Each structure stands twice: as structure tokens, then as C-alpha cells.
Image: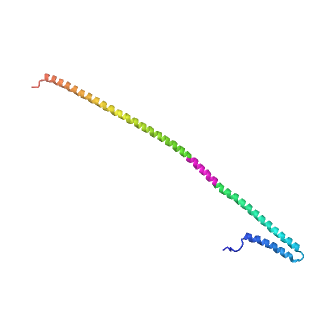
């Protein structure tokens, strides 16, 4: 289990380095007459700590900059792929709509031709039916006239037969 009260490893190492510098400066102070050297060492230690802090900050900035650019790259690639896919789908859909509209126009044209042909067939059928009725009446009249002529001919023939062959026999 992680001890949450302890300082993180990176920070702990940095503070230990600073403490070592101060400890080094304190161990060098065994001579009482070198106060200026001790002050100089403290200033140098602070300067060194500040320089290390600046380097660490610069390293972190560089790391964050590299991380940011990498994240932007990692995010932009799928976004570009998605945009390309969306554009391709939109192009396919627009092409589909154009083809669909053209096909629908052809279907409407065909249906209008079918309706027109149906009307023509209906008209021709009605004309044919009317002419058939007229023809059948003419044929019927001709048939009746022919039958009546045949009947009169048969009757005349019967009269001739009756004259030639007497019925009394």
C-alpha cells in the first residue's frame, strides 16, 4: 500500500539534493573565521537549487510541449479519418439520391406510358366491340335475309315438286 504521507520520489530526491548541499556547506563551516565563505556557499547552494529548479521547469515545459503536440497528433489523425469518412458517406449518399431521383423519373415515365397505352387499348377495345356489334347485326340481317330467300326458294321448289309429283298417290 502506498504511503500517502511520504513525499513523491522525484520531489524527495530533489529536496535531498538541496539538503545535501546545505549539509555540505554546514560541514565546511568548522572554521569560525570563514563566515564569508559560508555565506558564499549558501548563496551558491541557493543559486544551484534555483538553477536546478529552472532546469526542472524547463524539462517539464518541454515534456508538456512534446506531450501536447503528440496528443494533438493522436487526436487529429482520427478526426481527419472521421472527416474523410463522413465526406465519403456524403458523396455516396448524394450520388445515391441522384441515381434514385433518375430512377424514379424513369419509373414515372414508364407508368405514364403504361397509362397511355392502357387508355389506347381501352379505346381500341371499345371501337372493336362497337364494330363487332355492328358486324354481328349486319351478319344477322344477312343471315335472316338469306334464310328468307332460301325459304322462298324452297317454297317455290316445293310448288314445282307438288306439280310434278301429285300428292294423291
Q: Position of residue 116 (x, y in %)?
A: 43, 37
Q: Quadrant of residue 49?
A: bottom right
On screen, residue 66 above or below 30: above
Q: Position of residue 89 (x, y in %)?
A: 58, 49
Q: Position of residue 123 (x, y in %)?
A: 38, 34
Residue at the location (81% across, 73% down)? 22
Q: Quadrant of residue 73?
A: bottom right
On screen, residue 113 above or below 90: above
Q: Nearer the viewer, residue 87 or 167?
A: 87
Q: What span is colored magenta in the figure? A: 79-93
Q: Nearer the viewer, residue 70 or 154?
A: 70
Residue at the location (79% across, 71% down)? 18
Instruction: Tell whether 164 sits left or right of 6.
Output: left
Residue at the location (56% across, 45% down)? 95
Main SS of the magenta part reads helix
On screen, residue 52 above or below 106: below
* Residue at the extreme left: 168
Inspect the magenta stretch and tell me whether residue 52 lies in it: no
Q: Nearer the viewer, residue 168 or 154?
A: 154
Residue at the location (59% across, 49% down)? 88
Q: Position of residue 114 (x, y in %)?
A: 43, 38
The quarter of the rendered structure image containing the N terminus is bottom right
On screen, residue 43 above or below 125: below
Q: Is residue 169 visible?
A: no
Q: Is residue 151 visible?
A: yes
Amino acid at each position: 500500500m502506498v504511503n500517502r504521507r511520504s513525499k513523491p520520489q522525484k520531489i524527495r530526491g530533489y529536496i535531498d539534493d538541496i539538503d545535501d548541499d546545505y549539509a555540505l556547506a554546514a560541514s565546511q563551516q568548522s572554521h569560525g573565521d570563514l563566515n564569508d565563505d559560508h555565506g558564499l556557499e549558501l548563496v551558491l547552494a541557493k543559486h544551484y537549487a534555483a538553477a536546478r529548479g529552472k532546469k526542472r521547469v524547463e524539462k517539464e515545459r518541454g515534456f508538456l510541449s512534446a506531450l501536447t503536440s503528440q496528443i494533438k497528433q493522436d487526436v487529429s489523425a482520427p478526426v481527419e479519418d472521421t472527416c474523410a469518412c463522413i465526406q465519403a458517406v456524403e458523396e455516396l449518399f448524394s450520388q445515391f439520391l441522384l441515381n434514385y431521383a433518375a430512377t424514379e423519373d424513369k419509373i414515372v415515365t414508364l407508368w405514364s406510358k403504361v397509362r397511355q397505352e392502357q387508355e389506347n387499348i381501352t379505346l381500341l377495345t371499345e371501337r372493336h366491340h362497337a364494330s363487332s356489334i355492328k358486324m354481328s347485326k349486319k351478319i344477322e340481317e344477312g343471315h335472316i335475309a338469306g334464310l328468307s330467300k332460301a325459304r322462298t326458294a324452297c317454297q317455290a321448289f316445293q310448288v314445282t315438286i307438288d306439280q310434278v309429283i301429285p300428292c294423291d298417290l
